[in-house]
Image: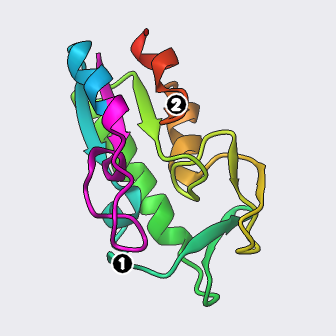
């Protein structure tokens, strides 16, 4: 199976802070299962730098902690991730939990207080609309068939 994966989960230093969220267990499971992982970072694809000011969804908008509206960059990155999924034959995605781009089912609530609210990140939402099965690093086994 070919799967999109948040690049930060693969150890790429593209997290807003400049670090990564490497998930060794996920990577080992994918290798063991013979899966092909396609790394994506919608924020970077959308033109945002690393590191960057944290951002959270506020309704349909994505706003940085300093008040800058970065919705257009998040939408552009989501569209590029979708195009990459289509070009590589991905049927699913494993994305970073809680992220305003990649969160699935729960994202930060837009107040920068570390509180979660029901919802999806911009990329997760778009991938779901186009029929991809989208999970986080917390429940990747459901997608990889373990």
Of marks 2 and 1, which one's residue comes earlier in the chain? 1
Q: Residue 86 vs residue 43: left or right?
A: left
**Where the N terminus falls, by quadrant?**
top left
- Of labels 2 and 1, the one closer to you: 1
Most foreground residue, 86 or 35: 35
The image shows residue 136 at horizontal and vertical percentages of 52, 36
Write down the residue under mark 1.
Answer: 51
* Point 54% across, 42% down: residue: 124
Q: Magenta segment: does it hold 17? A: yes
Q: Which residues are magenta?
A: 1-26
The residue that mark 2 highlights is 134
Task: Name the outermost residue toward the top.
Answer: 145
Marker disc for residue 111: none
Looking at the picture, how far across and down is residue 112, in whole percent?
70, 74
Q: In this rendering, is residue 114 above or below 96? A: below
Please provide percent x and percent y for residue 109: 76, 62
């Amino acid at each position: 199976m070919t799967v999109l994966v948040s690049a930060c989960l693969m150890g790429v230093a593209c997290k807003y802070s400049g670090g990564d969220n490497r998930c060794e267990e996920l990577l080992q499971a994918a290798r063991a299962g013979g899966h092909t992982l396609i790394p994506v970072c919608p924020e970077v694809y959308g033109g945002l730098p690393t590191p960057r000011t944290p951002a959270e969804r506020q309704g349909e908008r994505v706003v940085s902690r300093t008040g800058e509206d970065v919705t257009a960059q998040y939408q552009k990155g989501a569209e590029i991730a979708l195009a990459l999924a289509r070009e590589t034959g991905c049927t699913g995605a494993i994305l970073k939990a809680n992220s305003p781009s990649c969160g699935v089912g729960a994202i930060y609530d837009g107040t920068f207080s570390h509180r979660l609210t029901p919802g999806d990140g911009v990329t997760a939402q778009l991938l779901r609309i186009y029929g991809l099965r989208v999970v986080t690093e917390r429940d990747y086994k459901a997608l990889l068939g373990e």
